[in-house]
Image (cartoon, rainbow, N blue to C red):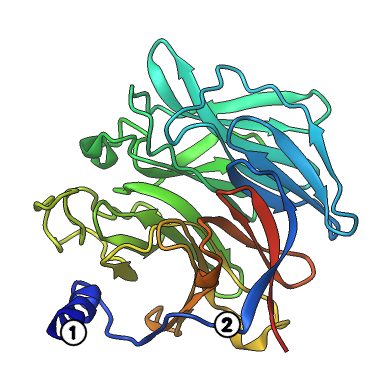
């Protein structure tokens, strides 16, 4: 009995919240649309019936939600690299154009590249991140559009100190002018591996989600030129134990929320529909290692006031979550599945 109580105690130590958490909600489930039986990474809605999906090894598929038929489309990614955490990464559809991120390799090493395509052969790599390393992890990267600006996230590539240097793109959120695709700025710095970014249009709020090391996964309220501290401050530690940095330091931003132990989440999204009224304006995290869809409720001061674990009964590594045009959430998994999230009546 004492052993069980210790486990419960330690599972909540280190968190910046003492909120109760629902471990399972069996009233929420998924209706699977298709299964590619290989690792998926990103997806977006082309229209109310079609979804474009990126498959890590380099293939792109379009799924019809009504017929459940899939078709592959051809895009050539120059200097494409797949290995470790690298491969074909995110996709975003915006105003008849498709934006892709992928792992790029040349003599300098490996980094993250950004491409614009119309899926008709007109493809353009418009940016190659200055984050060349020989490592195979922490590429980032997610897209979000706000007005005429495209934001993307770049991981630290395993070179922690570069997340603090404006001479490199490692550990940064970058902004681009959508009209010219010119890089506008390093928007924020001091990130470890941000694989989630989401915008709430009513609150005019941009939030990132990123992996900590051992512990210390966090969500951050992004504001231009802010420094989010990695690796100077973190609530995580070295794998196997050992301090990395401080928890706080003047001039470095604190997370809105951190989790210790880690949730291990990737894509994030705000739910902006009233189809499931209780979820409206909530933030959802697609979790890998903890195999769940995690619901976070924020108040007007951006404080986390409620948390809920969903879909853990599926035992699926959930890679990304998005809201569809029909007002429901959709998820993709590392096992290759695309599905619609619903509440049982």
Residue at the spot 70% in from the left edge and 61% down from the top edge = 339
Residue 102 position in % (x across, y down): 55, 32
Question: What's the residue at 24%, 42% (across, down)?
Answer: 164
Sort mark 1 into few (<14), some (14-19) or many (20+) by Cα contacts within 10 Å.
few
Front residue (pair 202, 324): 324
Q: Residue furthest top?
A: 107
**Pick the front one: 4 or 145:** 4
Place of residue 100 in the rendered image (x, y in percent of width and height, measured from the top left): 63, 37
Quadrant where the image shows the N terminus: bottom left
Q: Nearer the viewer, residue 201 or 255?
A: 255
For disc 2, the neighbor class at 10 Å (few under 14, some 14 to 19, many from 20) is few
Give the mark nearer the N terminus: 1 vs 2.
1
Q: Judging from the image, what secondary structure is the residue with disc 1 in? A: helix
Identify the disc placed on residue 26: 2
- State the residue lying farthest toward the front: 1
Q: Which residue position holds label 1?
A: 5
């Amino acid at each position: 009995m004492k052993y069980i109580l210790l486990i419960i105690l330690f599972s909540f130590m280190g968190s910046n919240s003492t909120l109760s958490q629902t471990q399972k909600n069996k009233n929420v489930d998924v209706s699977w649309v298709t299964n590619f039986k290989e690792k998926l990474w990103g997806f977006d809605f082309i229209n109310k019936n079609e979804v474009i999906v990126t498959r890590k090894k380099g293939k792109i598929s379009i799924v019809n939600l009504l017929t459940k038929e899939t078709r592959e489309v051809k895009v050539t990614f120059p200097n494409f690299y797949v290995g470790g955490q690298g491969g074909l990464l995110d996709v975003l559809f915006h105003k008849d154009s498709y934006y892709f991120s992928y792992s790029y390799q040349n003599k300098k090493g490996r980094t993250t590249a950004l491409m614009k395509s119309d899926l008709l052969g007109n493809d353009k790599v418009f940016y190659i991140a200055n984050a060349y390393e020989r490592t195979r992890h922490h590429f980032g990267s997610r897209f979000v559009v706000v007005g005429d600006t495209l934001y993307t996230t770049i991981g630290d590539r395993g070179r922690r100190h570069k997340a603090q240097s404006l001479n490199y793109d490692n550990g940064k959120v970058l902004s681009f002018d959508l009209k010219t695709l010119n890089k506008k700025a390093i928007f924020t710095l001091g990130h470890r591996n941000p694989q989630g970014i989401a915008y709430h249009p009513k609150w005019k709020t941009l939030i990132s989600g990123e992996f900590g090391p051992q512990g210390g996964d966090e969500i951050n309220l992004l504001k231009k030129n802010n420094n989010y501290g990695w690796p100077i401050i973190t609530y995580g530690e070295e794998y196997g134990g050992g301090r990395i940095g401080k928890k706080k330091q003047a001039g470095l931003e604190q997370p809105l929320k951190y989790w210790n132990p880690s949730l291990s989440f990737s894509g994030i999204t705000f739910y902006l529909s009233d189809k499931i009224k209780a979820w409206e304006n909530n933030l959802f995290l697609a979790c890998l290692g903890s195999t769940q869809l995690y619901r976070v409720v924020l108040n007007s001061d951006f404080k986390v006031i409620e948390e809920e674990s969903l879909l853990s009964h599926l035992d699926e590594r959930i890679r990304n979550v998005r809201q569809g045009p029909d007002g429901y959430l959709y998820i993709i998994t590392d096992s290759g599945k695309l599905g619609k999230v619903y509440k049982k009546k």
